[in-house]
Amino acid sequence: MNESFTGGGFSATQGGGGPSGPESKEGVAPLVIQQIYQLGDDGIKIFGFTYGVISLVAIARSVEHTSTRIMYKLEDHTGKIDAHLWLEEGKPENKEHIAINSYVRVYGMARTHITGGGFTATQGGGGPSGPESKEGVAPLVIQQIYQLGDDGIKIFGFTYGVISLVAIARSVEHTSTRIMYKLEDHTGKIDAHLWLEEGKPENKEHIAINSYVRVYGMARTHSGAKVIMIFKIMPIKSVNEVTTHLLEVMHARFQAEQYLRLMDNGGNAAPMKDPTMEVDAPNNGSFATGLKGKPLLIYQAIKNHTSEEGISINQIHQKFKHIPVAEIRQITEAMSLEGHIYSSIDTEHFLPTE
């Protein structure tokens, strides 16, 4: 296994700064390559402090471009390490040209990567290659970020390198060391921090209050609260990006569920459907045959709901208060396994398969 340095971030760091005390998960740790190899996979823990981001100055010995990432081989006086910059699908590469054998400064996260190592700096886009893959960007909503643990971005059996979030910037507060944002989407609110590099100007992109922004970063628990460590934040230019992000959130979950079902079925292309799951067509649109009683009521509520993210378990319970929440969960889980419905933005929201 090789060490991998992953760049990107939620409590976004531009540079500079430092921890406020032991186990503080903020600030930038200036390291050499030898120190990066000594890090564990439980965060950037150095001398009793936990940092949010690594800063490294090294020589770029080689640069290799692919359609999804740029791969660098870095070297300093203490050793060598690979670094990966993931590219955002459909957007041009980072404009800054890196010449071979020139010095570079890199901000990112260190990861142990089984297939080849790297200091994986993520710009956006991409996806996981399989369970426990530590590469790619996970498109999420705020509610999903709160559900993450502190052992990495583990979602639906996959481990990603960076989070992507589209939300409204409700407030922006500047200090000498960081910019603090309060972000909100339709699922909740969260704080996000962009650390500034000492002696350098702030990020040039102006973020207007109550405007939509896209953020790349990492989620951290700080003083008992979930915080986004931002690597990159940019204003949304078109409202279509908001809709596209929501579709990406649903698609990421759908892809992961398909993959896991495939593995559960021994690698077959798709599970066989039961004949009783075919769809009929009376009564203002079809409903799944074989359903009756409470499952049919819940299915019809899911089918008739009009929002893009689907109906939630709590919304179903509001419609049918005589059905306990626990029973609704059991019914929706069974209907998911049978192929009538699928979960959308998270495990609490559902859409019909037809």
Image (cartoon, helix red, strand yellow):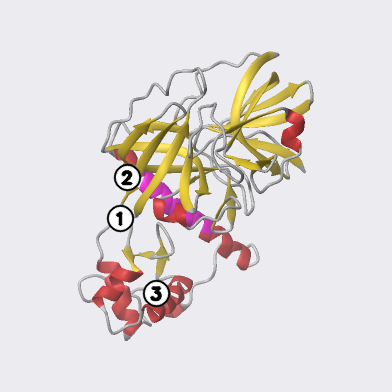
* Residue count near mark 2 (Cα–Cα under 10 Å), binned few <14, some 14–19, many ≥20: few
Q: Looking at the picture, does residue 181 appear above or below residue 14?
A: below
In the rendered image, residue 246 lying in the magenta stretch gets the answer yes
Quarter of the image for the C terminus: give it.
bottom left
Say what amino acid the circle numbered 2 marks: Thr
In the rendered image, residue 59 lying in the magenta stretch gets the answer no
Magenta segment, which residues? 243-256
Which label was assigned to residue 278? 3
Say what amino acid the circle numbered 1 marks: Glu
CB within 8 Å, label 2 to label 1? yes
Quarter of the image for the N terminus: give it.
top right
Q: Residue at x 58, y 54 (%)?
A: 158
Say what amino acid the circle numbered 3 marks: Glu
Q: Residue at x 57, y 52 (%)?
A: 150
Give the residue number, with chain letter if any, for mark 1: 308
Q: CA distance from mark 3 to mark 2?
A: 31 Å
Secondary structure mostly seen in the magenta stretch = helix
Give x and y (percent) for residue 207.
32, 30
Q: Is residue 123 left or right of residue 166?
A: right
Instruction: Pick out the residue farthest to the left.
Output: 284
